[in-house]
Image: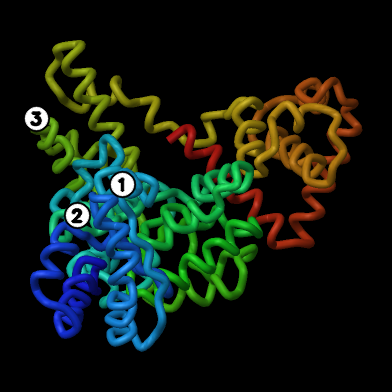
Amino acid sequence: MNSPADIWTKILSLMEGDMTSTTINTWFDDAQAVSLDENRFVLHTPSNFKRDIIKSRYLPAVQKALRELFSADFEVVILGEGELDQQVKSVDETFMPGTEEYTFERFVVGASNKFAHAAAQSVADRPGQSYNPLFIYGESGLGKTHLLYAIAHKLHASHPDFRILYIKGDAFTNELIQAIREGRNQEFREKYRFADVFLMDDVQFIAGKESSQEEMFHTFNSLYEAGRQIVFTADRPPKEMLRLDDRLRTRFEWGLPVDIQPPDYETRVAIIKNKAIRRGMNLPDPVLQYIAENITSNVRQIEGTVNKILAFQELMGENVNVETVTRAVRDMFKDKADFLPSSDVIIEEVSKFYNIEADAIRGQGRTKDTALARQIAMYQIRRMTNLSLKEIGREFGDRDHSTVMHSIERIEKLMKQSPEVAEVIKDINTNINARYE
């Protein structure tokens, strides 16, 4: 994949046929390519004087070179002093605190994730050329996000000039809503469509959201046609995202969909041992076996277990054996059904999913979306907690228990009639359960 810097080098070479080397060195010596999408090239020079000269004298030469390279006309934007900060985020802003350990070297490979790991490495070695898009799917806590960050870190090291953007699906929607409210739609589009590498975690959360899907469709097209690498993760394959636009589903499947399965016993032992060693612990084999036998599906929970054992050892000063480990982490081995979310958590997650204030869901609002969100919240509380119908009614402004029962029955009926409603329930469940992992 050619980066904007590579394209700029070729442009300069073509421009040598139309102007002297002195002219190029004088006006373009400190110019840097910012981005290139399907019809727009952005160049930056730190001098406003040079910016104005390039605009007035040499813009046609840059456009001519682009036309020779791509057989298409491009809009050329020249940025001057202070204007670069208004463009997309820098590469360094891609990496969130605490992601340093999410590298390929620290990813434990086993039969359940070998294919996904190999595909991610191939993308990092040859961005935009191997598999585009790469679509990694699997249940929560299996290492999908780890692979996303591993790709980002490796590309950051090998291509420091790349703009690498990472975002979660729900954050993309929230950012778009904010941009629409503040009239910054163009700024939002430029941020993502000018990326060299675009990484989206939990893309399933844009499904069913019309504006988000529309923006993603055009963002995908811009990036794909410019040869930029795209990587998605999700909890299910594209074909199972029933609320996803068909045109997006098709594009998500253009490249390579790969899944990650829960790790087998041997891989779990290797993961536990690896994480313990990195934290300065050498766990005895019986302890390794005990943890591996009790945690069977979630890598993230394995990491939490190792952290808790380390804290227990530091605070209690006891030797690590099966007995002390059992005391330290017995609550982590309970079945997920033993953990009951509060009604506040459930209403909050429904609120976030529908972008409706929690007070509105609890209140008397009668708009179609608010009413549906309220009924789903009632259904989820009834299903996921031990609250009675009367107690649920109190959570929603002392509604009568018959109103609560009607809401629950309506959602149950809708789930049977509409796979899309069932998928909404699944997405909200995922978000609620993630709070307790």
On the image, which quarter does residue 396 sit in? top right
Q: Residue at x 58, y 75 (%)?
A: 247
- Residue depth check, mark 1 versus mark 3: number of the one nearer the observer: 1
Label 1 packing within 10 angstroms: few (<14), some (14-19), many (20+): some
In the rendered view, tell whether residue 14 sits above or below residue 315. Answer: below
- Residue depth check, mark 2 versus mark 3: number of the one nearer the observer: 2
In the rendered view, tell whether residue 382 sits above or below residue 344. Answer: below
**Residue 205 located left or right of residue 190:** right
- The residue that disc 1 covers is 94
Q: Residue at x 79, y 55 (%)?
A: 414
**x and y percentages locating residue 200 in the rendered image:** 41, 56
Q: Is residue 259 visible?
A: no
In whole angstroms, how far apart are the C-alphas of marks 2 and 3? 28 Å
**2 or 3: tag closer to the N-terminus:** 2
**x and y percentages locating residue 339 in the rendered image:** 52, 29
* Secondary-structure class at tag 1: helix
- The residue that disc 3 covers is 280
**2 or 1: tag closer to the N-terminus:** 1
Q: Amino acid at mark 1?
A: Thr
**1 or 3: tag closer to the N-terminus:** 1
Q: Amino acid at mark 2?
A: His
Q: Residue at x 21, y 66 (%)?
A: 5
Instruction: For the N terminus, give its image quadrant.
Output: bottom left
* Secondary-structure class at tag 2: helix
**x and y percentages locating residue 143 in the rendered image:** 31, 51
Q: Which mark is residue 156?
A: 2
In the rendered view, tell whether residue 117 sits above or below residue 308. Answer: below
Q: Residue at x 19, y 54 (%)?
A: 156
Instruction: For the C terminus, give its image quadrant.
Output: top left
